[in-house]
């Protein structure tokens, strides 16, 4: 089971019309809902299971600018600005703290790579800097090894995924937005080639625009509507400890571990640079798009030949709007964590920082991460279907940049000047301009 979540009241009735329908109740969809509600736009969010039930509550909780793909840096800066005021904005504690973030380096080669990133990112006036070994020892004391250096950003932070998304949804509801959980979207309808409604298991909601923020499910939804979206799922395994006094407050990532302080006094711990990629039917379908990424990142994944192939092969790829969809068959993706990787992360952390030795594992969970070939999300319109917008493929980076992504999507839907340049996030970079949808 995933982390415990705040319960959010679901609206019982399904509106017959809204300006915008959002499909998916993770950080991306809920941030968009909140941004639209604040602008007085009529919006409905439908979620097949529970809000933040999948990867949006299962991530590490890092809120960072440092080390990001350069396309994401402006969005990260905007998101941190929003995180600063999020508690007041939603009327509740989301656990955000600008405690800093630090990426430790084992070798001079790693230090040089971060120096190159910093040189490229200076145009956004980031506060990141590269530290030497003595500075690392002073910032993150108690390590059993001597680090070659680190990338450090004092104004990066952390937040609590299990708190933030539900509180944001509650705030949007207070502003008039509608949230319906336990209600899967099966597809959309078009009139003269343009979005005219979203079909849910409870009926049709007519609308002017639809936003798909379906996380790991987005490719399946798009495929049924005739839209080819190259996205694969990878498994991350994470743990949290019981309360532990002493170790640092800032978020830290080493070569084979990562940790950050939690609001409850424990730590979220993960095995950095180690995810599991399942061999599934889509692995073969998308091999041309993902082959380059697989080669470049081969040291960050463990290939699993068994575990999900048969399960995913049985999922229908096509269904009619008047029949049950795969989203109704699986309300929440709740994969088992890899216990070996969880133990690896704990052991690696204890070797590097012995102060963690007394920490007891309180819980471990798995989460399926939606990944694109370039590890950059899609946030924008699908030009082949006017009125249809996609935000997915955050590739494990989505929680921290969620608020900025939500504002960007809301502005694109409303047709106003966007907060950041949306071009790096366009869907058509994957050749999506060839998608066809029957009217």
Image: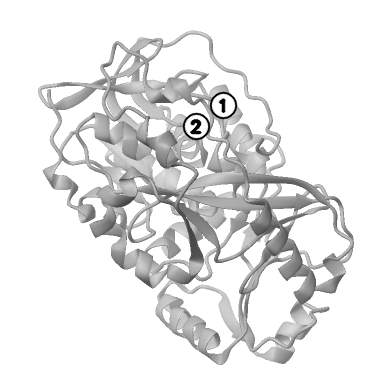
- Secondary structure, mark 1, is loop
Q: Residue at x 72, y 87 (%)?
A: 135
Residue 207, above or below 133: above
Residue 187, above or below 79: above
**Residue 398 in the image: x percent, y percent?**
49, 51
The residue closer to the viewer here, 33 or 247, is 247
- Sooner in the amino-acid sequence: mark 1 or mark 2: 2
**Residue 164 in the image: x percent, y percent?**
63, 40
Can you say which quadrant of the picture contains the N terminus? top right
Discs 1/2, front: 1
Task: State the separation of the CA atoms marked 1 and 2.
Answer: 7 Å
The answer to whether any part of residue 45 appears in the image is no
Q: Residue at x 74, y 62 (%)?
A: 346
Can you say which quadrant of the picture contains the C terminus? top left
Question: Disc 1, disc 2: CB below 8 Å?
Answer: yes
Residue 291's quadrant in the figure?
bottom left
**Residue 266 in the image: x percent, y percent?**
81, 53
Residue 292, above or below 95: below
The residue to which callout 2 is attached is 25
The residue closer to the viewer here, 336 or 273, is 336
Disc marking residue 50: 1
Q: Residue at x 16, y 27 (%)?
A: 194
The answer to whether any part of residue 25 appears in the image is yes
- Secondary structure, mark 2, is loop
Residue 219, above or below 207: below
The residue closer to the viewer here, 434 or 76, is 434
């Amino acid at each position: 089971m995933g982390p415990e979540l705040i319960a959010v009241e679901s609206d019982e009735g399904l509106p017959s019309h809204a300006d915008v329908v959002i499909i998916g109740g993770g950080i991306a969809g809920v941030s968009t809902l909140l941004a639209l509600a604040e602008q007085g736009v009529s919006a409905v969010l439908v979620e097949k299971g529970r809000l933040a039930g999948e990867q949006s509550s299962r991530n590490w909780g890092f809120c960072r600018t440092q080390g990001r793909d350069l396309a994401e840096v402006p969005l990260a800066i905007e998101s941190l600005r929003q995180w600063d005021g999020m508690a007041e904005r939603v009327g509740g504690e989301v656990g955000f703290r600008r405690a800093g973030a630090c990426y430790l380096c084992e070798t001079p080669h790693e230090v040089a790579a971060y120096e190159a990133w910093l040189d490229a990112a200076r145009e956004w006036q980031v506060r990141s800097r590269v530290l030497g070994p003595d500075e690392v020892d002073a910032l993150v004391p108690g390590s059993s090894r001597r680090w070659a250096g680190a990338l450090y950003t004092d104004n990066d932070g952390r937040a609590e995924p299990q708190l933030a998304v539900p509180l944001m949804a509650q705030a949007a509801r207070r502003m008039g937005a509608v949230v319906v959980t336990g209600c899967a979207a099966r597809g959309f309808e078009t009139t003269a080639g343009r979005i005219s409604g979203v079909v849910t298991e409870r009926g049709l909601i007519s609308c002017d625009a639809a936003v798909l923020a379906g996380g790991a499910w987005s490719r399946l939804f798009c495929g049924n509507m005739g839209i080819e979206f190259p996205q694969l799922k990878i498994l991350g395994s994470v743990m949290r400890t019981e309360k532990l006094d002493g170790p640092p407050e800032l978020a830290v990532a080493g070569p084979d571990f990562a940790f950050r302080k939690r609001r409850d006094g424990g730590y979220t711990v993960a095995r950095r640079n180690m995810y599991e990629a399942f061999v599934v039917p889509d692995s073969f379908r998308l091999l041309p798009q993902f082959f380059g990424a697989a080669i470049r990142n081969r040291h960050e994944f463990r290939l699993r030949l068994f575990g999900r192939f048969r399960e995913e092969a049985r999922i229908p790829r096509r269904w009619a709007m008047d029949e049950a969809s795969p989203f109704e068959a699986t309300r929440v993706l709740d994969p088992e964590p890899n216990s070996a990787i969880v133990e690896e992360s704990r052991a690696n952390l204890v070797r590097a920082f012995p102060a963690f030795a007394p920490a007891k594992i309180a819980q471990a969970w798995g989460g399926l991460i939606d990944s694109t070939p370039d590890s950059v999300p899609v946030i924008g319109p699908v030009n082949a279907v006017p009125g249809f917008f996609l935000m997915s493929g955050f590739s494990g980076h989505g929680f921290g940049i969620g608020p900025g992504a939500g504002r960007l999507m809301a502005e694109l839907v409303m047709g106003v000047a966007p907060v950041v340049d949306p071009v790096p996030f366009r869907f058509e970079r994957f050749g999506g301009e060839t998608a066809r949808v029957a009217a």
